[in-house]
Image (cartoon, rainbow, N blue to C red):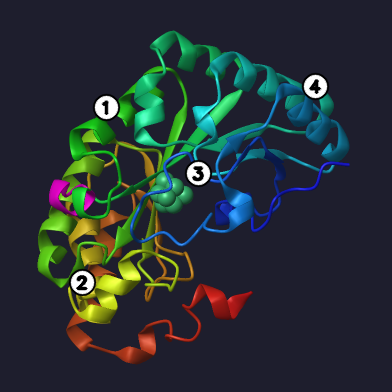
């Protein structure tokens, strides 16, 4: 039996999914705010077809309705292997209706349109991408390996191939200095890329992430909770989606929002503005409960 290298990460919405660890670690592994995949056993590598198929065989069950291919940026795998993997997941799990994967902007843009269409035809439904920001200065500082334009292109390329996009945005990642620009540029990027899902998270500076040292030295200043909410307000107000889910229900956030855009936009923005104007702490998630580490 092949055991998964731990710790393994997956989006919260994939909590009940069949997890297939097709790669180990992250092919990029440079983002300054990221403390994931830093253990010695998580050095990036791709599993062989034999290993991946064995994992599928050993973990399949009719109880699964969704599958998620991990680890970080598993979309880096060659298209043929990925396509065979997705097909095998469906063959072995008759009740699975959705297969998703983590991908980064560079890997998406490196795939040809035909590659992405092949993956869509095999049954790849959605790619989770960490956008983090639409501000190029911030993206460069956090070593994301992508800029705003490329991020927009990656969203369009996936959607053109018939693959849904779920993008994560990181409130606070621009620091105090870039807070407003980060928020406005992110809203503009989201509006131009028009993802199907937007998941907002709030930055938590963790030992093990390179940004921790800059935060300790004072070079990087985290916006306070009401400034983070202001970023949320700006993004909520300035983002235009054709038909998208706009969520800030991840536990790292001070204010959980679950909205469908454009339907719920007006009331969502109104709610955020009211909470900011009252400066009411009682409407916000406490620091203890928003600390991911305390909850596991
Ligand atoms: S944030 Fe994602 S892409 Fe960046 S280093 Fe961490 S796992 Fe890799």
- State the CA–CA distance, disc 4 to disc 3: 27 Å
Can residue 224 be seen here? The reply is no
Decide whether residue 251 is among the magenta residues: no
* Distance (Cα) linking label 1 and label 4: 32 Å
Q: Are marks 2 and 4 in contact (CB under 8 Å)?
A: no
Residue extent of the magenta highlight: 134-139
Find out if the beta carbon at label 3 lies less than 8 Å from the nearest ligand 1 atom.
yes
What residue is disc 3 on? Answer: 26
Q: Is residue 216 above or below residue 271?
A: below
**Residue 267 shows in the view:** yes
Disc 1 or 3, which lies upstream in sequence? 3
Residue 107 or 262: which is nearer the viewer?
Answer: 107
Up/down of 208 relative to 279, above or below: above
Disc on res. 220: 2
Look at mark 4 in the image and give the residue it sits on: 91
The answer to which of 74 and 244 lies nearer the viewer is 74
| Residue 51 placement (x, y as % from top left) | 77, 30
Foreground of the two, 141 or 276: 141
């Amino acid at each position: 039996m092949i055991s998964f290298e731990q710790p393994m990460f997956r989006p919260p919405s994939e909590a009940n999914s069949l997890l297939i660890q097709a790669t180990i670690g992250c092919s990029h592994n440079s983002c300054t705010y990221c403390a994931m995949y830093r253990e010695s056993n998580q050095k990036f590598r791709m599993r062989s077809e034999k290993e991946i198929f064995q994992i599928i065989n050993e973990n399949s069950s009719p109880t699964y309705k969704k599958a998620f291919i991990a680890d970080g940026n598993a979309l880096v795998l060659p298209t043929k292997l990925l396509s065979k993997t997705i097909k095998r997941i469906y063959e072995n799990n008759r009740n699975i209706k959705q297969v998703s994967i983590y991908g980064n902007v560079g890997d998406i843009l490196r795939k040809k349109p035909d590659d992405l269409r092949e993956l869509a035809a095999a049954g790849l439904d959605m790619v989770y991408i960490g956008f983090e920001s639409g501000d190029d200065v911030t993206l460069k500082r956090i070593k994301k390996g992508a800029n705003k334009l490329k991020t927009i292109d990656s969203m369009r390329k996936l959607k053109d191939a018939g693959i849904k996009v779920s993008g994560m945005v990181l409130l606070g990642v621009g620091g105090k200095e870039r807070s407003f620009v980060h928020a406005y540029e992110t809203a503009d990027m989201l509006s131009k890329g028009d993802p199907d899902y937007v998941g907002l998270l709030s930055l938590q500076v963790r030992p093990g992430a390179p940004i921790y040292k800059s935060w300790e030295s004072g070079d990087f200043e985290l916006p306070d909770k009401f400034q983070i909410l202001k970023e949320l307000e700006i993004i909520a107000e300035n983002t235009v989606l054709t038909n998208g889910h706009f969520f800030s229900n991840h536990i790292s956030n001070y204010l959980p929002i679950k909205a469908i855009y454009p339907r719920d936009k007006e009331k969502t923005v109104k709610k955020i503005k009211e909470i900011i104007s009252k400066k009411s702490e009682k409407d916000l998630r406490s620091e203890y409960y928003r600390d991911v580490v305390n909850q596991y």
